[in-house]
Image (cartoon, rainbow, N blue to C red):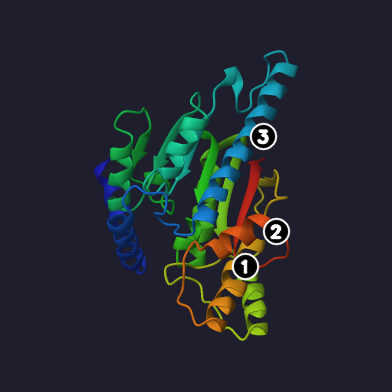
Amino acid sequence: MTKDTQQELNQSKDYDLEIKKHYDKVAEADKDSSSSTMADLYIRENETKFIENQIEEFTSQQKCEYQASVGYATGPGKNDKFTILDVGCGNGYTLEKLSNTFPKIDFQGIEFNDSLRQIAFNRFTDKKIQIANGDIRNKNTLPKEKVDILICQRVLINLLDENDQKLALNNLVNLVNSGGLLIFIECFKSGLNNLNSARKEFELEDLPPAHHNLYLSDEFFQHKSLKEFDNTQKELFSTHYFISRVLHPKFLIENKKGFIRNSHFVSFFSNAFPKNVGNYSPLKPLCFTKI
């Protein structure tokens, strides 16, 4: 990295200090645990499963296309080689899980927060997974080589300016090879609005977005270079949010009990009831291919 690039990387936005303080606390409290950046264990587990399933589906499709073309395919997966970049990789938890599931894929991660990045770096001292400093708002700090699959897990919402979010999306799209896969797990305003409407029926107060988040509009990913890959699971967390953010808090109030995170109540009903019911989750997993 050149001196000029490092200077650009260090030029902070007005909100950067707030984000830094938040994730420094997360790094100190959770270290390399799975709960880092996501204390809801149901969501964490199912996010990872979703990402694994999408990678499996995409790579299988690419292998079939490559074989069908008798080796003349030029898209991702040629010679059965894939590269994956996790932007905002945090403490490296997701990268570690994926690298164990897909040992033949080349992985790398970038992380803007120094504290989390150091934990991720230490996690992979015995593996060939590079962890680098990068700011998705600044293309000069991002990898020069394009990748086949990009993962962006609750990262864009940490940019507290809509113009920065749009700029970052363009930069992320440009990091991916033509025909490549982009996996986003981000929060949207519409899901939160529906959730709060449900909470009103149960005489519960509105839930605001987290102080370090700016939720997206439903139209955010309407990008000229993105085509839907498989978004049938976009309401994957809707049932869980209704149970954990509506039914469970009402149950606790009625029974005069304190808040319990990852309770048996929430775990049982979230796993017993069908997923993808309604639109009560701000958090939505989405997948696109690059045109």
Indicate the position of residue 205 as horizontal and vertical percent values. Answer: 55, 84
In percent of the image, x 66 and y 68: which residue is there?
280
Residue 57: assigned label: 3
In percent of the image, x 33 and y 34: which residue is there?
124
Q: Residues within 10 Å of mark 3 (few under 14, many from 20)?
A: few
Element under label 2?
loop
Q: CA distance from mark 1 to mark 2?
A: 10 Å
Element under label 3?
helix
Element under label 1?
helix
Of the image marks 3 and 1, the number of the one nearer the N terminus = 3
> Which residue is labeled 1 in the image?
243
Q: Is the residue 75 above or below the residue 12 in the image?
A: above
Task: Report whether residue 220 is seen.
Answer: no
Q: Residues within 10 Å of mark 1 (few under 14, many from 20)?
A: many
Of the image marks 1 and 2, the number of the one nearer the N terminus = 1
Q: Which is more toward the observer, 192 or 137?
A: 192
Indicate the position of residue 158 as horizontal and vertical percent values. Answer: 44, 62
